Image (cartoon, rainbow, N blue to C red):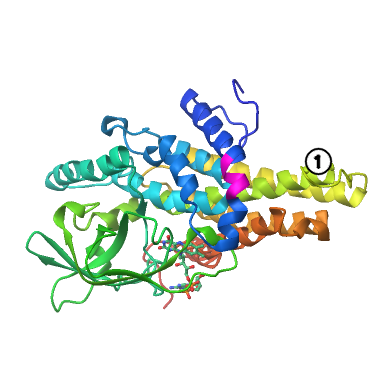
Amino acid sequence: MDNLDFTPAVGDLPFTAQQRTLLSLANELGRTKFAPRAAQWDQSASFPFANYEDLRQAGLLALCVPKAFGGGGADYATYMMVAAEIGRFCGATALTWNMHICSTMWTGVLADGIPMTETQRAEHVKRRELHFARVVNDGAIYAQPFSEGSAAAAGRAPFGTTAKKVEGGWLVNGRKIFASLSGAANYYGILCTEDKGDEKPDARDTLYLAVPATSEGFSISGEWDPLGMRGTVSRNLAFKDVFVSDGEQLMPRGVYYKGAQTWPAMFFTLSPTYLGLANAAYDFTVSYLRGEIPGEPPVKRRMYPTKQIAVAQMRIQLENLKSIFARVIQEARPNPSPDEKMRLYAAQYTVMEGANDIARLAIRTCGGQSMMKHLPLERIYRDSRCGSLMLPWTAELVLDRMGRETLYRPGEKDD
Ligand SMILES: Cc1cc2nc3c(=O)[nH]c(=O)nc-3n(C[C@H](O)[C@H](O)[C@H](O)COP(=O)(O)OP(=O)(O)OC[C@H]3O[C@@H](n4cnc5c(N)ncnc54)[C@H](O)[C@@H]3O)c2cc1C
């Protein structure tokens, strides 16, 4: 591997020059800046603003904005590799950065593979310029609050938040829960249902709108004191007759619904954070057993066969996570084949459940002293527990989809 003096969280793949540069940058930022600060955000459940300043200065907020608009022009696979590297050092930073990056990927590299009419395409090309310019020129941060506590975020019902067409824009009403970056984002990229009068709401009328944080009628509420991923500050949002101008549409009317079907790999974008955490738990265990954790007594624990076996088991699991992750990010594309889709589900389950399992083994193997709050392992363990709760691809829903989609072909029913 040319020029890399470390093994990235994604593994040792044949990287492009751009990927090598970005992975080195993420590793350097992570080791020197994000890891030393991670405890601080976790303790106070506060947003990692200082890390965002570093991301901004490094050009990483604009990573997936196409080059033609002044961004980094990174594709899906490149983003996923870099995100895993950041997750290795600070889970909350990687997870929130994902929400921001996805807002630029949906509108950027992915939109190009989503079917649109000529009029929709022309509208989209014109409108996305505004969003990209904010990110590139002003360092704006976009959140991605989709969840509402209903079946909508699981893709099983229309969103309860509505947008009614008015002169020059939309009137938004509703609420969102678990809005990572609440209070930190400049724009909240919400999914809502177009209110077409008294017709039955339809998920095909999903709109994707950016609500400016300064909008009248927009508010943030609720406590934020969770088990893990505390620095994400994922509080509740309320929208009361919020006027959002036409220009704030992140996708033309009706296109998001098609996009979600066309690009299922987008729902896998929450996983690199957790691949990073799995690497972090493994890295910590190796250093701890070798007596190499800075600031700790140089006690070696590596001579016990039980610990050697546990490290081997962790490595086997980590290699499994990396292998399936690397495969699916490289084959990700619009309209994947049924096998590719199954593999995406399997990868999501493997990474989300596997990360927590590796963290569990790490604590068991390192022992009681390793779970003290001044060491990162207990935070990694708590953060890693959150992965399989993320909709629409929770561990439960992935199992549900895989079983059903294997045993029933499209349209098949039992009489
Ligand atoms: C740290 C963190 C950050 C988050 N950040 C964001 C964010 O930025 N944006 C965002 O949109 N969301 C975010 N979420 C929300 C997340 O994606 C889920 O929406 C949320 O965790 C769901 O809450 P719940 O488990 O109470 O949901 P519930 O609706 O109570 O579901 C509980 C479980 O039941 C299962 N389930 C749900 N619906 C169905 C169904 N129709 N059929 C079968 N089973 C079902 C699922 O396995 C689900 O995990 C975040 C969550 C966490 C933990």
Would residue 293 be counted in the magenta stretch?
A: no
- Determine whether the beta carbon of the residue marked 1 sits less than 8 angstroms from the nearest atom of ligand 1: no
x, y (%) of residue 259? 31, 52
Q: Is residue 257 above or below residue 226?
A: above
Q: How many marks?
A: 1
| Residue 24 quadrant | top right
Question: In the displayed structure, does residue 328 sit left or right of residue 75?
Answer: right
The residue positioned 34% from the left and 42% from the top of the image is: 139
Does residue 305 appear to the left or right of 21 in the view shown?
right
Instruction: Specify whether 380 is left or right of 363.
Output: left
The residue furthest left is 167
Q: Taken as a whole, is the magenta stretch helix, strand or loop?
A: helix
Q: Locate residue 277, reporting x and y percent.
A: 62, 50
Which range of residues does the magenta coloring cover? 33-37
- Quadrant housing the N terminus: top right
Residue bearing the label numbered 1: 292
Query: Which quadrant would the C terminus be assigned to in this image?
Result: bottom left
Residue in front for this viewpoint, 92 or 190: 92
Q: Nearer the viewer, residue 270 or 62?
A: 62
Name above or below for residue 295 compared with residue 150.
above
